[in-house]
């Protein structure tokens, strides 16, 4: 199979028929073998019925339905797990991503040899309340991740080598940082393609200010997890040892001044309490690192979701 197209969606019943038809047209024109995996993330509208009808008409259209809303990262993760294509392409269901970009994205993966190609909505039709936070988010992500050739980390239109999506894990709200996750898993051949951004025709945007705030919190989280997730003792243990010995040095200094210089009232000095505090904090950080090591070595699967139905896919 040439291409798997993974489409996470939430309440997009109006746009799905047009999207499926558009993708089918592009696939047939380029003679691609393909599958469309639509992941319904707990929609409350008629989205699942639309997917069912489409899958009866075309067996290449497959569906996964969550029992409740888990978020875009969860939808992408189960879509990645089900994908069988040589190239995996993700796109949003709101018709703002153009399927006409697929052939060039496929070429960049298969011919040019990139691990991941991320779309860049160079000209956007979003309101300023979305575009300004997006620019700030992308600037911060470029700085932290050291991936300087991407302008739009959160664009839903991306293409991957199959081995990339089978090697990474996306959970929480980490879909914004898939290029970062891929790079830190050794897939560093990352490119960007300017893509056409369509105006939204149906429904309303799912973007809210809380997603902007959560985005920066997730960036801090993924940076920590990527660097120290498998070795938490390296960060907590280091901080703990430094804090502990800083406190010990303070207490040794106070002991010497009292013993040899006769300084009185040591317990009334702020530096005494600072020494005690840093020893205690250092011990706690060291213990936290040790417990983190135990958890990291015995962690359970974080990507288990209640799926109510599947279409044209094995259970």
Image (cartoon, rainbow, N blue to C red):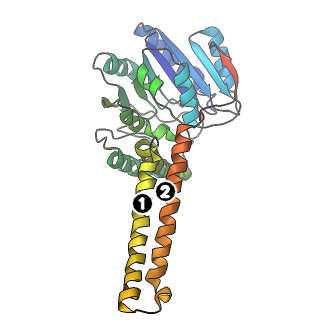
Contact (CB < 8 A) between labels 2 and 1? yes
Position in image of residue 236 (x %, y %) = 46, 54
Q: Which mark is residue 293?
A: none
Report which residue position mark 1 lands on: 241
In the rendered image, the quadrant that contains the C terminus is: top right
Position in image of residue 172 (x %, y %) = 56, 41
Question: Residue at 40% of width from left, 92% of height from top?
Answer: 263
Position in image of residue 106 (x %, y %) = 37, 18
- In the image, taking residue 75 as reference, residue 89 lies left or right, namely left
- In the image, taking residue 291 as reference, residue 308 lies left or right, namely right
Examine the rendering and report whether any part of residue 243 can be seen: yes
Question: Residue at 44% of width from left, 54% of height from top?
Answer: 237
| Mark 2 closeness class: few <14, some 14–19, many ≥20 residues within 10 Å | many
Residue 198 is drawn in which quadrant?
top left
Q: Earlier in the sequence, mark 2 or mark 1?
A: 1
Q: CA distance from mark 2 to mark 1?
A: 7 Å
Question: Residue at 50% of width from left, 86% of height from top?
Answer: 267
- Numbered disc 2: secondary structure: helix
- Numbered disc 1: secondary structure: helix
Residue 149 is drawn in which quadrant?
top left
Residue 178 is drawn in which quadrant?
top left
Extreme residue toward the front, this view: 260
| Mark 1 closeness class: few <14, some 14–19, many ≥20 residues within 10 Å | some
Position in image of residue 301 (x %, y %) = 59, 33
Q: Foreground: 168 or 255? A: 255
Report which residue position mark 2 lands on: 286
Examine the rendering and report whether any part of residue 211 can be seen: no
Seen in the picture, residue 92 relative to 210 is either above or below; the reply is: above
């Amino acid at each position: 199979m040439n291409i798997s197209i993974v489409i996470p969606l939430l309440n997009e019943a109006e746009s799905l028929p047009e999207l499926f038809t558009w993708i089918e047209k592009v696939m047939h024109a380029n003679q691609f073998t393909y599958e469309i995996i639509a992941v319904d993330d707990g929609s409350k509208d008629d989205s699942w019925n639309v997917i069912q009808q489409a899958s009866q008409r075309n067996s290449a259209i497959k569906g996964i339905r969550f029992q409740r809303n888990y978020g875009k990262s969860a939808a992408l993760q189960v879509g990645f797990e089900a994908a069988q294509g040589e190239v995996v392409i993700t796109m949003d269901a709101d018709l703002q991503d153009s399927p006409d970009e697929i052939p060039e994205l496929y070429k960049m993966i298969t011919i040019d040899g990139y691990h991941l190609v991320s779309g860049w909505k160079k000209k956007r039709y979003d309101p300023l309340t979305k575009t300004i936070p997006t620019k700030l988010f992308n600037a911060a992500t470029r700085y932290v991740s050291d991936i300087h050739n991407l302008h739009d980390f959160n664009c839903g239109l991306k293409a991957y080598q199959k081995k990339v999506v089978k090697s990474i894990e996306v959970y929480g709200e980490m879909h914004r940082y898939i290029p970062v996750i891929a790079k830190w898993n050794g897939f560093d051949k990352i490119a960007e393609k300017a893509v056409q951004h369509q105006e939204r025709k149906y429904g309303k945007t799912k973007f809210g200010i809380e997603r902007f705030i959560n985005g920066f919190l997730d960036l801090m989280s993924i940076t920590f997890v990527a660097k120290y997730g498998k070795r938490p003792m390296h960060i907590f243990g280091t901080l703990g040892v430094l804090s502990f010995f800083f406190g010990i040095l303070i207490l040794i200094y106070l002991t010497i001044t009292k013993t040899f210089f006769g300084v009185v009232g040591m317990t009334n000095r702020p530096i005494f309490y600072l020494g005690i505090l840093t020893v205690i904090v250092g011990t706690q950080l060291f213990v936290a690192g040790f417990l983190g090591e135990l958890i990291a070595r015995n962690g359970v699967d974080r990507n288990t979701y209640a799926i109510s139905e599947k279409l044209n896919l094995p259970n």
